[in-house]
Image: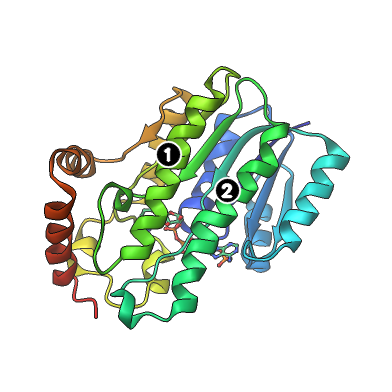
């Protein structure tokens, strides 16, 4: 049985992966989707032509991993693609954000992504693909978005290293690093999202199309759009301290507090 697994499938980038994957991987038997909002996942299931198995649970709790582990052991599927898209970001300087919210970012963006990846690896084989949703925020320290950017640097670094580890087995890992994308992400981000970011948000359809194409080609990173590609090169050239101060100025224009 050939399956794909997508987390964060109830909205935004994850939902778009769930919509586009069956069109690209026509030999899939099932799509497994993970998020907390059951009704959103049920709506998605109605719309897709492929059988969908719903895991409507919180990735910060153990239950979803325990259930998935049981299903994996029982069905021994061939996981053709894993997309870790569930994630969140809280805008604001560390001192103004509550500690629980900041640790929540670490739990979801780092811990959950790592746990699910490790759980799925034994069920992947040559030609399988892992798509980790990092962010352009991974490229630089971001005062005003510090924990989020650091969590995405983890995702980026983890993905690049995992890609090297798995290449001999023919398993491809792609770190997707979008700039601002027009999803519900900013509604949950608290603080002001930043007027500049709003003006430059990409549409999730295009970001995901590019990511799937890059994953298909076996690319280790997927960066959508000329601006973000340029920002990545720029970030590589500047010293960290200068970069952090520059990002602080840019983020302050976004009026976070
Ligand atoms: N939008 C951007 O500008 C942008 C840019 C770069 C990278 N990203 C990254 O892209 C990924 C997807 O974000 P998005 O833009 O699509 O935002 P979104 O529309 O807010 O989607 C976030 C998804 O994560 C799920 N989720 C959140 N907390 C969860 C939890 N505790 N357990 C299980 N699922 C959970 C949400 O589902 P439920 O609420 O139903 O649980 C939702 O499906 C994130 O990793 C984000 O960091 C976004």
147 shown above or below 54: below
Residue 43: x and y, percent? Answer: 64, 60
Q: Earlier in the sequence, mark 2 or mark 1?
A: 2
Q: Residues within 10 Å of mark 1 (few under 14, many from 20)?
A: many
Q: Is residue 33 visible to the viewer in this orientation of the structure? A: yes
User: In screen coordinates, is 23 left or right of 191?
Assistant: right
Q: Pointer 1: what residue?
A: 175
Foreground residue among 222 and 208: 222
Q: Quadrant of residue 220?
A: top left
125 shown above or below 231: above
Q: Residues within 10 Å of mark 2 (few under 14, many from 20)?
A: some
Viewer-nearest of discs 2 and 1: 2
Q: Quadrant of residue 168?
A: top right
Residue 79: x and y, percent? Answer: 69, 34
Q: Pointer 2: what residue?
A: 114
User: In screen coordinates, is 194 left or right of 212?
Assistant: left
Q: Which mark is residue 87?
A: none
Looking at the rendered image, the quarter that the C terminus falls into is: bottom left
C-alpha gap between disc 2 and disc 1 = 13 Å
């Amino acid at each position: 049985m050939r399956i794909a697994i997508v987390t964060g499938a109830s909205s935004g980038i994850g939902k778009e992966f769930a919509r586009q994957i069956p069109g690209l991987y026509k030999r899939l038997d099932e799509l497994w989707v993970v998020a907390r909002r059951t009704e959103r996942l049920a709506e998605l299931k109605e719309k897709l032509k492929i059988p969908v198995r719903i895991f409507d649970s919180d990735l910060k709790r153990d239950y979803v991993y325990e259930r998935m582990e049981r299903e994996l052991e029982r069905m021994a599927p061939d996981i053709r693609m894993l997309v870790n898209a569930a994630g969140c970001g809280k805008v604001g300087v560390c001192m103004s954000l509550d500690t629980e919210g900041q640790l929540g970012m670490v739990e979801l963006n780092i811990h959950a992504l790592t746990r699910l990846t490790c759980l799925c690896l034994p069920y992947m084989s040559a030609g399988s693909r892992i798509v980790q949703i990092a962010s352009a925020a991974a490229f630089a320290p971001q005062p005003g978005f510090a924990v989020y950017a650091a969590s995405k640097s983890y995702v980026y670094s983890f993905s690049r290293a995992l890609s090297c580890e798995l290449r001999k087995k023919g398993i491809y890992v792609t770190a997707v690093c979008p700039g601002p994308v027009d999803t519900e992400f900013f509604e949950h981000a608290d603080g002001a999202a930043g007027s500049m970011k709003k003006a430059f948000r990409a549409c999730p359809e295009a970001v995901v199309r590019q990511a799937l194409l890059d994953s298909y080609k076996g690319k280790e990173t997927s960066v959508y759009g000329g601006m973000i590609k340029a920002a990545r090169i720029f970030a590589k050239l500047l010293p960290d301290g200068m970069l952090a101060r520059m990002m602080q100025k840019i983020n302050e224009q976004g009026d976070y507090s």
